[in-house]
Amino acid sequence: MDYYSSYQAIQKNIPSNVKLIAVTKFQPVEVLEQFYKETGHTIFGENRVQECVSKIKSLPASIEWHFIGHLQTNKVDIIVPQVHMIQSGDRFKILQEINREAAKLDKKAGVLLEFHIAREESKYGLSFDQAAELLESSSFTAMNNISIRGVMGMASFVDNPVQVRNEFRSLRNIFEQLRRNYFSNDEQFSELSMGMSGDYRIAIEEGSTMVRIGTLLFSDRSVNASA
Ligand SMILES: *Cc1c(COP(=O)(O)O)cnc(C)c1O
């Protein structure tokens, strides 16, 4: 029963203006209930659609959910009504679909634009040029039910802090350039979501406003949970 001490240890490294997203992937509901009970933490992130929906159903309504995984267009209708923010806005088509579903609910969906900053090929995300083209398109301007709140990205999984720092720095530059060019009158464009268990301290040094942490928070017990 000791999520609290590891939670506290991590929170100590996170300045109060940086939000901690507790990433719940692979964690069963019982673990999350316990974590919530012990820590009172209320910002969770999940990257798989079905898991996300069933966890939302089972956990207290006071929890704010962030969808952080690659999203297929045919699952958007399930996610949009349930979450506070979709952090994986990685292509035009998905924004279009999110906008359509949010319009049905007469709400504005909070979305982060996801950028590909890692060297690894496998990661999803936009390039700066793709994002600029998207943001300048008339079809984007017509999306009245989306609110772009900032950007998200993942650094390479490498044991090279210099490379990781450079990748975070490139995301920060993208964030600031987009803010100048497209969102100078929009205070809602304010989030720079970067940093995970292995690299969140570097991300914070490079200006992160949201760190997404799973393994570090839950690792002690995920072994038991999956046994
Ligand atoms: C899994 C995941 C995280 C958290 O990763 P950890 O290394 O477990 O902290 C953060 N962001 C995304 C998009 C993820 O898929």
Image: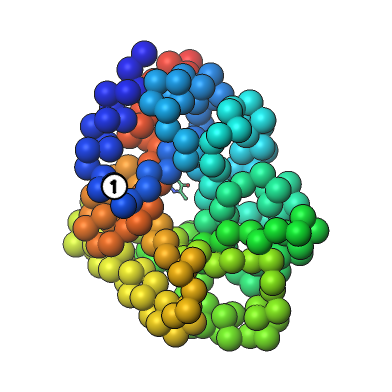
Count residues near mark 1 (Cα–Cα under 10 Å), then give few for <14, some for 14-19, many for 20+. few
* Residue 39 in view: yes
**In the rendered view of the protein, which quadrant contains the N terminus?**
top left
- Please give the name of the residue rendered at 21% of the width and 58% of the height, measured from the top-left corner: 205
- Please give the name of the residue rendered at 27% of the width and 23% of the height, measured from the top-left corner: 5
Q: Position of residue 46 (x, y in %)?
A: 54, 41
- The number of numbered discs placed on residues in the rendered structure image is 1
Give left or right: position of 135 versus 107: left
**Which residue is label 1 attached to?**
16
Vertical side of 110 occupied by 186: above or below: below
Q: Position of residue 200 (x, y in %)?
A: 29, 49
- Please give the name of the residue rendered at 46% of the width and 69% of the height, measured from the top-left corner: 187
Q: Amino acid at mark 1?
A: Ser
Which image quadrant shows ligand 1?
A: top left
Q: Quadrant of residue 207?
A: bottom left
Q: Residue furthest right?
A: 104
Vertical side of 148 occupied by 222: above or below: above
| Helix, strand or loop status at disc 1 | loop
Give left or right: position of 24 versus 9: right
